[in-house]
Amino acid sequence: MDKIGLIWSELRAGCDVANERIQTRVKEANPVSWIDTVPESEAADVLSNIYNESRAKFGRVINLVKIQSLRPETMALGREFYRHLMDSPSGLSRLQRVLIATVVSKVNGCLY
């Protein structure tokens, strides 16, 4: 197994443990929430552009985008910041950045 494969398998093992803890908490809490969103038919300007990008990439407007729809300018800044972190020159490769983001998301219980 190469170095990246070894690192990936170690990260996955740690994520599996974290995921079990998260799933247990979710089952115990049985959380339910409701967030107002802007319907796709009412999206305009910045939000319309973001919705279109989501459709182009995923085939639909994903929930992660919809839940931020009341503050499209803030969402646009967050997306710009994300792209800067993932794409700007750095000592880390794109693969390393994606692996780090994946592990952090998994540990935090984020399904995206």
Image: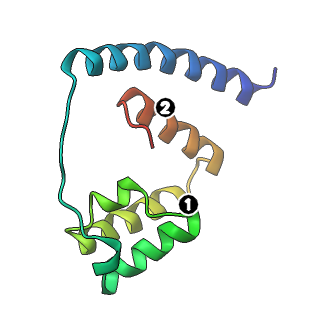
Count of numbered badges drawn on the protein: 2
When asked about the image quadrant of residue 77, the answer is bottom left
When asked about the image quadrant of residue 6, the answer is top right
Quadrant placement of the C terminus: top left
> Which structural element holds mark 2?
helix
Q: Position of residue 29 (x, y in %)?
A: 19, 20
Q: Which residue is mark 2?
A: 103
68 shown above or below 76: above
**Residue lying farthest to the bottom in this orientation:** 45
Say which amino acid is labelled 2.
Val
Q: Position of residue 71 (x, y in %)?
A: 21, 69
Quadrant placement of the N terminus: top right
Q: Residues within 10 Å of mark 2 (few under 14, many from 20)?
A: some
42 shown above or below 67: below
75 shown above or below 41: above
For the point 51% across and 69% down, which residue is it?
55
For the point 26% across and 75% down, which residue is it?
73
Q: Residues within 10 Å of mark 1 (few under 14, many from 20)?
A: few
Looking at the image, residue 101 sits to the left or right of residue 63; the answer is: right
**CA gap, disc 1 to disc 2?**
22 Å
For the point 73% across and 26% down, which residue is it?
5
For the point 36% across and 19% down, which residue is it?
23
36 shown above or below 18: below
Say which amino acid is labelled 1.
Phe
CB under 8 Å between discs 1 and 2 = no
Residue 58's label in the rendered image is 1
